Amino acid sequence: MPVFSRPSSRSMILLAVVTAAGLLATACSSGDGMSGMDHGGPASSAAPTSGHDMPGMAMPSGDGLAAESAGFRFAPETTTLPATQPSAFRFRITGAGGAAVTAFEPEQTKLMHFYLIRSDLGGFQHLHPTMAPDGTWTAGLAAAQPGKYRAYAQFTTKDGAGKAVPLVLSQQVTVPGDAPDTPLPAASSTTTVDGYTLTLSGDKLMAGMSHELTVTVAKDGKPVTDLQPYLDTYAHLTGFHAGDQAFAHLHPHGEVKGEHGGPELKFEATLPKAGDWRLFVQFRTGGVLHTAAVTLAVS
């Protein structure tokens, strides 16, 4: 165990002076409260960052399975989608008194991230809807096969005190008809898409604990170094839990520097539940967006 010596009287006096100065500085800096805050402006510079995460990125709380949290609600116009044809999914985020929220802050360059996934963790869609002046968001969905789905809205807004609130809210939706579930692929450390091979590495993941996950991208056996920026990073990684479809957004580490990303991409992986997770890795090369899927086991 560490051994500590008794501080001298002079040291204790110096510590008291420094502490008092710090308290005075804090009081002065908070004197203007939340006045003058622009709800429609860019993400606040006071948003929490770790030094490794992308600037302005805030970690939403919860597992994304609630329709309402912190006084905000995800309110779709309908919970039924047409089968095997494109459709427009409209929704609002409501606040106090059921009024539509119209002020949001950018999260990875977008004001709203919308996800749709089937109960068997297939049919993944990640879109960036547009908002009308009345606060109605519209997401243009690709055709979906029959089944039960969950729709997610990921966003950051502000509460009545002006504090940024990052949230992921969701609702179940249905596509009428019959279609068999596809068995979840077994857990693996590699996956392929469009001729690219992605390899996952890092410590064994434990539920509720933060780990660093590395994704290495290769093509034809050679490291890929021409990844282009996508949402202010070189890859976007989202996870869904098998069984209940709990949501997790894995935050990237590092900074974007030109169109020469890769081959290694590092993420902060905090998955809240044990079991199998289906991860979707999105990255861009040559102006084309690729989406790879892989199953990851969490203890």
Image (spheres, rainbow, N blue to C red):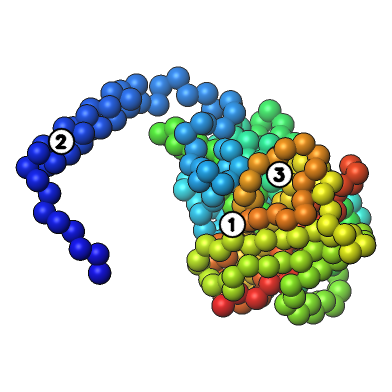
Q: Is residue 167 above or below residue 182?
A: above
Closer to the chain start, of discs 2 and 1, is 2
Could you tell me how far apart the alpha carbons at marks 2 and 1 are, in whole angstroms?
39 Å
Foreground disc of the pair 3, 2: 2
Rendering coords of residue 70 (x, y %): 47, 48
Label 2: which secondary element: helix
Name the outermost residue toward the left.
9
Which structural element holds mark 3? Answer: loop
Instruction: Please give the name of the residue rendered at 59% of the width and 38% of the height, measured from the top-left corner.
Output: 55
Crowd rating for badge 1 (residues with CA inside 10 Å; few <14, some 14–19, many 20+): some
What residue is disc 2 on? 14
Which circle marks residue 145 in the picture? Answer: none
Q: Which residue is mark 3?
A: 233
On the image, which quarter does residue 297 sit in?
A: bottom right
Count residues near mark 2 (Cα–Cα under 10 Å), then give few for <14, some for 14-19, many for 20+. few
Q: Whole-percent x and y of residue 135?
A: 65, 34
Q: How many marks?
A: 3
Find disc 1 in the rendering and name its residue. Answer: 268
Q: Give the amino acid type for the residue marked by disc 2 in the picture.
A: Leu
Against 165, is 102 above or below?
above
